Amino acid sequence: MSLRGVIFDLDGTLVDSQLDFAAIRAATGCPDGLGLIEYAEGLVEDEAARVHRIIHEHEMAGARAASWIPGADDWLAALRRQGLPTGILTRNARVPTALTLSRLGIDVDVVLTREDCRPKPDPDGLLRIARQWNLPCEALVYVGDFRYDIEAARRAGMQAWFYDTGRHSHFGDDADRVFRDFLELMGE
Ligand SMILES: [Mg+2]
């Protein structure tokens, strides 16, 4: 089935927000192997609030620093010219996400943050977007740079495309397509 819509991860895929996840994990005390959101969910109220505050500060700093991943802007513009629906599904919160999008002028049809759906790798957000577009999941692509992205796409029954930055190429093993440069996708 041909491509009928594209959904993007935000950090590390569409934009480089220079988020230092290792620093956030260290500052919050988040153990290895556990996601920050999942870590916060398991904490008592005061501790969870402290962790969310730290995450928020980092996400806002990331939003202020964010720049386009080279070529991502061109491919997104090409998809929109073709009339394909486009979306963003991110584990970030709504306020820093909105700041990133407005600063960089990123225009997509739908944006879901962690306040809008269950966070990846849960496929909830992807399934919501497919329902909203009234399109079958297998005709949609989710593009991301992390294992949560591949897993969410798999569980939603969407095509999983992996943007390989060279940092953790093995995540691409489970992807339907691996690319290293958005320019590879132009003109298809
Ligand atoms: Mg990412």
Image (cartoon, rainbow, N blue to C red):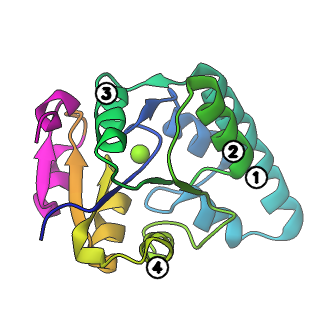
Q: Are marks 4 and 2 in contact (CB under 8 Å)?
A: no
Q: Position of residue 177 (x, y in %)?
A: 12, 53
The disc labelled 4 sits on which kind of residue? Arg
Q: Which mark is residue 52?
A: 1
Mark 4 / mark 1, whichever is N-terminal: 1
Q: Reading the chain from its start, which is encountered first: label 4 or label 3? A: 3
Q: Which residue is mark 4?
A: 131
Quadrant (top left, top right, bottom left, bottom right) of the C terminus: top left
The answer to the question of whether label 4 and label 3 lie on touching residues, with beta carbons closer than 8 A, is no
Q: Callout 3, which amino acid?
A: Asp
Q: Is residue 11 left or right of residue 69?
A: right
- Which element is circle 3 on? helix
Mark 4 / mark 2, whichever is N-terminal: 2
Q: Earlier in the sequence, mark 3 or mark 1?
A: 1
Ligand 1's image quarter is top left
Nearer the observer: mark 3 or 2; the answer is 3
Which residue occupies 32% across, 59% down?
A: 5
Span of residues in magenta: 168-188
Q: How many numbered circles does the render carry? A: 4
Distance from disc 4 to disc 3, alpha carbons, whole Å, reads 27 Å
- Residue at point 46% right, 75% down? 122
